[in-house]
Image (spheres, grey):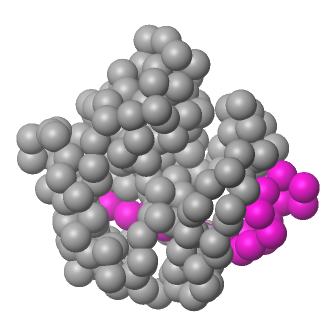
Amino acid sequence: EHLAAELDRKPLDRHLLNRFVEETRGRGLVADLGCGPGHVARYLSDQGLDVVGVDLSPEMIRVAARRNPGIEFRVGDMNALAMPAGALAGAVAFYSIVHLDSAELAPILREVRRVVVPGGFVIVAFHVGDQVVHVDDLFGAKVSLDFHFHAPSQVIEALHDNHFSVTEHVEREPYDGAEHPSRRCYLLARSV
């Protein structure tokens, strides 16, 4: 419920997702990796993309499917996506790498590269920094989560090492009152 309308308060996120749409519309299936409750997948679908949402959490997939009828959602692990090589025209990873430390980026990006067609487009969004933020309460629910922040240079290196060419690099300050107060980075890349 908290995330369902968050893009309404994030104009740059919408702009960059629209940029992704421009690059992938009409080229085939795209994936929202780490889709959570499906709000980004819904936004992409509303813009005319054929999209599938993938998340490790069966409960998130249940919520996403209930909230977003007409969009396919699957339980899946970004380390081993149940898709053939070259199945996707593109992939979005909006804040899904926040659950990974830097050493885990290369295998994930290798798997993303496997499923994205050559010339496909990818957008990765994350918090900038080198800290790990632990939370015990999120949106009023008891949790035990670590959020890993990343240096853009490390993510860019991991993308390059896994055959992606970064075409655009955007950073922004947090939207006051709309999100965690941290700097954000968005990397748009093409598979080579």
Q: What residue lies at 57% left-to-right and 87% top-to-bottom?
A: 130
Q: Position of residue 25 (x, y in %)?
A: 39, 32
The answer to which of 144 and 118 lies nearer the viewer is: 144
- The quadrant holding residue 39 is top right
Q: Position of residue 173 (x, y in %)?
A: 78, 71
Q: What residue lies at 59% left-to-right and 80% top-to-bottom?
A: 132
Q: Position of residue 80 (x, y in %)?
A: 18, 52
Quarter of the image that includes the N terminus: top right
Q: Is residue 183 left or right of residue 109?
A: right
Q: Can the viewer see residue 48?
A: no
Q: Is residue 34 left or right of residue 15?
A: left
Q: What residue lies at 35% left-to-right and 52% top-to-bottom?
A: 121
* Residue 180: in magenta span: yes
Q: What residue lies at 44% left-to-right and 12% top-to-bottom?
A: 70
Which residues make up the magenta segment?
A: 171-190
Q: Position of residue 162 (x, y in %)?
A: 22, 73
Extreme residue in the left direction? 84
Extreme residue in the right direction? 177
Say if 159 sits above or below 82 in the image: below
Extreme residue in the front direction? 142
* Residue 160: in magenta span: no
Say if 157 sits above or below 8 in the image: below
The answer to which of 54 and 160 lies nearer the viewer is: 54
